Amino acid sequence: MEEQRPYWLSEAVNALEKKYFPEGGKVEFHAQAVTAHAEEPWHSMDTKKRTAILEELCGIVSSSGHQVVLFGIAVEKAANKEPVARAFEEICNRFDMFLKRLYAQGKTQRGLIIFDETRYETRLQTLLSHYRDTGTRFGKVKNFADVPFFADSKSTRLLQLADLVAYAIFRRYERSQTWLFDKLVNKFDIEDGVIHGLVHLTRDHLTCTCPSCLSRRLAQRAE
């Protein structure tokens, strides 16, 4: 997203919090926790209201215009020995490709990747340094301003929205549940009919009918 957008997205999530929790108190929106409703404030909330909250969170993302573009990687673990490293390589490459397109349009911006805190922090920082110096399997990444940064999702609404996107992708590919994913799919980076921002790393890419795999096959047939 462009640098002006985080403030307005955060404000929209804060307004959603005030709508459903007018009594106050900081609420962290984690999609899995909302769905599981094992703990408060979700445990005592009825399904209809919890569903409405998730849909409205999706609406905040989907209505954000061209200033917000999504990237996501779905990894079939059986087909990838190092799923974390492979997914990170792909998302760095896809984001770098996007920034290159902006550069060609005269928008000379650099990019930052911010993660929720994870035990992979040191490894991911090392990997990106390697991608910048030596390259990925797709070539060097040249448009990042710095190494990845890590933050506590409790302190930033943007990571809570990123969690929502990741959860929607997981439910689509792991559980074949599309109701959240379908509300977000049009926000993934797309060019000439190919969804570059969504990658499905699977052995069945020649027959898979997910939006990512299908868009690539249709583009190849059109060439």
Image: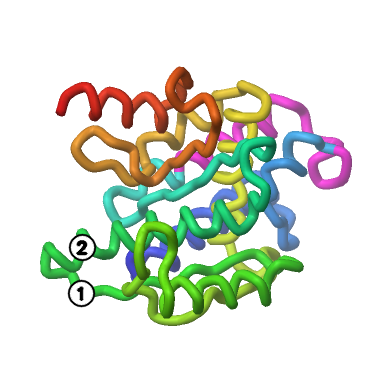
Is residue 4 highlighted in magenta? no
Residue 39 in the image, given as x and y percentages of width and height: 87, 44
Relative to 29, is 103 above or below? below
In the image, 187 versus 46, the foreground residue is 187
Marks 1 and 2, how far apart in space? 7 Å
Compared to residue 216, the image places residue 21 above or below, namely below
- First in sequence: mark 1 vs mark 2: 2
At 50% from the left edge and 40% from the top edge, which residue is drawn? Answer: 58
Q: Quadrant of the C terminus?
A: top left
Does residue 217 sit above or below 57 in this rendering? above
Q: Which residue is mark 1?
A: 108
Residue 118 vs 163, above or below: the answer is: below
Callout 1 touching callout 2 (CB < 8 Å): yes
Q: How many marks?
A: 2
Magenta segment: 38-59
Give SS at disc 1. Answer: loop
123 displayed left or right of 6: right
* Residue at 49%, 47% in the rendered image: 72
Q: Quick one: 171 or 44, which is closer to the camera?
A: 171
Q: Residue at x 81, y 46 (%)?
A: 41
* Amino acid type shown at disc 2: Leu
Quadrant position of residue 31: top right
> Which of the colour schemes (rainbow, by chain, secondary structure, one colour) is used?
rainbow
Left or right of residue 122, residue 108 in this image: left
Q: Position of residue 105 (x, y in %)?
A: 12, 63
| Residue to which mark 2 is pinned | 102
Amino acid tagged 1 = Thr
Q: Quadrant of the N terminus?
A: bottom left
Occupied quadrant, residue 173: top right
